[in-house]
Image (spheres, grey):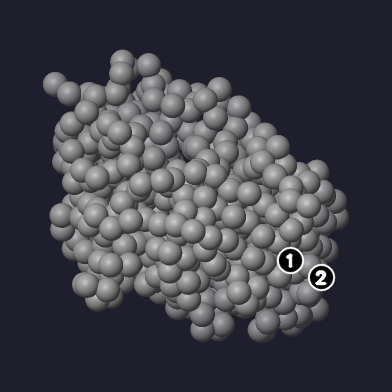
Amino acid sequence: MRSRMRLLSFLLVPVLFAVGCSGGASPAGPEAAGPPQRGGELTVLENASFTGSWPTGLDPATNTTGGANIPMMSAIYGGLFLLRANDDGSGAEVAPNQAEGYEFTDGGTTVRITLREGIQFSDGTPLDAEAVAFNFQRALESPCTCKPTWPLADDGISTEGDRVVVLRFTRPYAAVIHSFPASNVNWIASPTALENLGEERFKIEPVGAGPFTVVSNTLNSELVLQRNPQYFKEGLPYLDRLTFKSIGGDQPAYQALLAGQAQAYEGLTTTPLLEQAQADPRLTVTLQPPTSPYVVQLNTKAAPFDDEKAREAIYHATDFEAIARGLFGGRYPVSQMFTGPGGLFHQEKIEGYPEYDPDRARQLVTELGGLDVTLGTLNSYVAEQVMTALQTQWKQAGINVDIEHYQLSTLVQEFNSGNWQAMLQTAGAWDPASGVGVAFRFSSTSPFSGVDDPELDQLLNDAAATIDAGEREQLYRQAGELIGANAYAPFGLAFAPANLAVKGVHGPGLTTKIPPIVVNTGVIWDEVWREQQ
């Protein structure tokens, strides 16, 4: 018997988050600044160490940094599904966008996705079931870390008519819809344009069905977009032109906003600048609800962390509560597992979590005959501050630490080499089963995991499969307890960057709160607008 499963009824538990932010932003839709106005241009700055780096272009199947480049990808391709804040500020939901709806059957092993009728790519060709199925196949063969880990059957992707795409799994997989906003399967490229242009040209001149089309694309530098006249939403997008520019960090971005060289910046992490910006009447500052706590990933597949004593020493030498208070004034909450307060199934404390105990850490280091660690991370203010604090804490326990900083592309290479020891990364997503979620950092099959534990794999698979929110929560709690019991990786403060916009700029996710999907919030670009002079 076929059974319809509604996302809001079964897959979601309410996600509550604080709604106050500087500049008068509201929790969900556009602020009370009058009706949105059509027209104008917007320049958005992106940090060169993360979102502002797109070295392999913007083809969903060949962009190796697609998870970081969600702003550009969403502006060009739109998306089958979007993560939106509820209008009443009570939480968030994954909502159909280019998709019209979906239906689970066969006990959750099959999902049928129905597309909206009449959507066209900007080249005039149809965004139909055949195009979507073609894109799914390419996306799943992609080298991008943003491709989903669906448990597809051999005949896992098929179509039924022009508007229905069918996914079949080897086991129930209720989390599939939540996986879309953070993965490359959400961005549907024109098969005709890809064939006509070829992959090398297409990655520079991509063609989608999103709100904007490409005017020019200089890799890692500037992407200029203009309104898509064939966009399927009447009256949208509001902006005539949207430009993304890469910039070398928070300080130059902040100065560029004040100098009038840009109107928005995504991903501010420098705490002193954040405080300045919040006090500046020229800016709207939006602090997003954190979904991804920091984690010290330990490579348990290689020395020294193939020895549980070494891992336990790291746990007992680490005091994230002191770091959160001393460096950040308690601004960021500390979590003992892979969820933050802005995401689903958040649990702040885990039973049996190895607590800070420097005496025990020193004892373990002595038993090991010493402990030398190379700790790496991406370049960002918060990460660098945390790294320095960890180095100091660990030194007090007799642990010698060398620090390495990476750009995103080189970090991916380091993980793929398997030769790393410890990495300070974010672990988690709005839904733990999607995006850079728990399996990304802890499953045996992920290249970005330092763990190989079949019992943990089974817990994560079971949690992703069930449609019962209470059961999912319990399974994720068990997974968190297992990670702690084996000292796989200590978790830290749950952090989300802030978005800055000059006064007169409005839009969901930019000047309102939407939980981040991969570090940064997924701004809904077709609804961003500027007050006209």
| Amino acid type indicated by mark 2 | Glu
Q: Residue furthest front?
A: 161
Q: Which residue is mark 1?
A: 171
Estimate the x, y position of residue 141 in percent, counting from the top left: 48, 76
531 shown above or below 327? above
* Residue at 21% from the left image edge and 64% from the top image edge: 205
403 shown above or below 532? below
Helix, strand or loop under label 1: loop
The reply to whether residue 183 is in sight is no
* Residue at 24% from the left image edge and 45% from the top image edge: 230
Q: Is residue 313 left or right of residue 132?
A: right
Q: Is residue 317 left or right of residue 150?
A: right
Estimate the x, y position of residue 455 in percent, counting from the top left: 81, 70
Foreground mark, 2 or 1, reads 1
Asked if labels 1 and 2 touch by Cβ distance under 8 angstroms, the answer is no
Residue 112, by quadrant, is bottom right
Q: CA distance from mark 2 to mark 1?
A: 17 Å
90 shown above or below 290? above
* Residue at 67% from the left image edge and 34% from the top image edge: 14
Q: Which residue is mark 2?
A: 455
* Residue at 76% from the left image edge and 56% from the top image edge: 107
Disc number placed over residue 353 in the picture, else none: none
Q: Is residue 361 left or right of residue 298?
A: right
As rendered, which of 164 and 225 lies closer to the eye? Answer: 164
Total numbered labels: 2
| Amino acid type indicated by mark 1 | Arg
